[in-house]
Image (cartoon, rainbow, N blue to C red):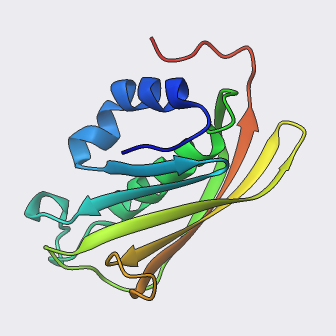
Amino acid sequence: MIEEPAPDVTAAMEANDVASREAGVRVLSVGDGSATTALTVESRHLNGHGICHGGYVFLLADTAFAYACNSHGIPAVAAGADIAFLRPVSAGTELVAYAVERALTGRSGLYDVTVRAGTEPDAPVVAEFRGRSRQVPGLAGPR
């Protein structure tokens, strides 16, 4: 169930975000400047070392970031992002990404996303992601 101030934005993004959906990312919640997404690591997500490919961890965090920075109802895109991978993840792990807005000044935003291996608040941190957004009011929304 999605709880957020701009439900039309969330619905449109979910309908059009084929990459996240096909990777298995689920949107758990969206709030004012925040979002939570999840992914259950499957064999299709594993790299050559038998652990979750960093690209999928990044995708999960980036998806939470995208929903958080678009939660204000103004189209926003990524201006940049960085991630620190802190621990490996094996198949069967439930990854949860928690995005929170740190600053929104003018059209520029700063968001932190913590990815945890589990749903508990104290579950081990897998990665820390920092995203920078730019609101683009004239950008055509999802069709």
Q: Estimate the x, y position of residue 99 in percent, counting from the top left.
A: 57, 60
| Residue 73 lies in quadrant | top right
**Point 33% across, 42% down: residue:** 20
How far from the left and from the top, in percent, is residue 42? 13, 63
* 12 and 91: which is toward the camera: 12
- Number of numbered discs visible in the structure rendering: 0
Front residue of this view, candidates 73 and 140: 73
Question: Residue 116, image x and y in percent?
Answer: 41, 77
In the picture, the quarter occupied by the C terminus is top left
Which residue is at a point 47% across and 59% down the rendered structure image? 61
Quadrant assignment for the N terminus = top left
Q: Is residue 41 above or below residue 3?
A: below
Q: Taking 125 as reference, is 39 above or below it?
A: above
Is residue 78 rendered to the left or right of residue 36?
right
Looking at the image, residue 123 sits to the left or right of residue 110; the answer is left
Residue at left offset 28%, top offset 60% = 39
> Where in the figure is residue 37, as x and y percent of width and height?
40, 56
